[in-house]
Image (cartoon, grey):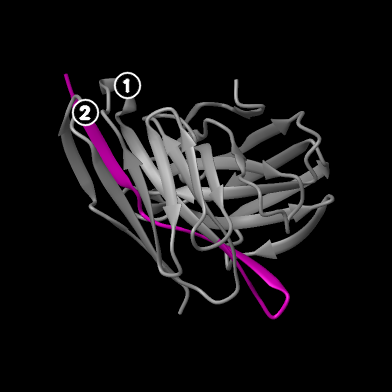
Amino acid sequence: EDQVTQSPEALRLQEGESSSLNCSYTVSGLRGLFWYRQDPGKGPEFLFTLYSAGEEKEKERLKATLTKKESFLHITAPKPEDSATYLCAVQAINSGTYKYIFGTGTRLKVLA
Amino acid sequence: ETGVTQTPRHLVMGMTNKKSLKCEQHLGHNAMYWYKQSAKKPLELMFVYNFKEQTENNSVPSRFSPECPNSSHLFLHLHTLQPEDSALYLCASSQDAGSNYGYTFGSGTRLTVV
């Protein structure tokens, strides 16, 4: 069964305390893995797409990496404005049908 | 602005009411989606429209009825809802349904059924 699991469910960091969020997946026919940021009361905002194992993408304090089984979102020296829920999603193709599967997210709180 | 606009932002309706949610995008995208987001659950795909044609109905109850008059507009008509339908309803768009670029989401409609 296709599945996306994110951990931890919630994370509290002090400002400047670097950490990583995990997204593990079990899908056949992976076409892409996506990271989104969601602020309270808003829709998810697209951050990155990773297409193949070994690929890395960076944006400001965020860096996403991908292996054949999981992806990490590394947050370096976070600031309070990085507080949000981070969602991972995978797109897979199976018998010509596309599926887009979301994880339940990691709620990040960065304390000043 | 995200490029995808949803109205209303908040909606409270009784179980016997009929209401509609509206979504509009001017990104030139050809695929539009309705998602339901409930607390501590993954986003649930409800409907997919690709080039104005419905390509997916993810076993959604008939009390939810989508409409896509053109590639820029998407509606979700609601009638005889249940309290468990209370959730954040998100509209999204992408270049097309097979695109493996990210989706653009609207800010959602927070629906409360009383």
Q: Quadrant of residue B29?
A: top right
Residue A17 is situated, as x and y percent measured from the top left of the image, at 18, 32
| On-image quarter of the C terminus of chain B | top left
Dots 1 and 2: beta carbons under 8 Å? yes
Query: What is the crowding at mark 2: few (fewer than 14 residues within 10 Å), some, or many (at least 20)?
Result: some
In three-dimensional space, the C-alpha distance between marks 1 and 2, rounded to whole angstroms, equals 8 Å
Residue B40 visible in the picture: no
| A6 sits to left or right of B61 | left
Residue at the image position 79 percent from the left and 54 percent from the top: B50
Residue A77 is situated, as x and y percent measured from the top left of the image, at 26, 28
Q: Please check the rendered image and state whether residue B51 is part of the magenta-colored stretch, yes or no.
A: no
Q: In what element is the residue under mark 1?
A: helix
Q: In the image shown, does B39 or A86 lie closer to the viewer?
A: A86
Residue A59 is situated, as x and y percent measured from the top left of the image, at 47, 32
Q: In the image shown, does B47 or A36 lie closer to the viewer?
A: A36
> What amino acid does circle 2 point to?
Val
Q: Which residues are magenta?
A: A91-112
**Mark 1 chain:** A
The numbered mark at residue A81 is: 1
- Establish whether labels 1 and 2 are both on one chain: yes
A54 in relation to A46, above or below: below
> What amino acid does circle 1 point to?
Glu
| A90 sits to left or right of A96 | left
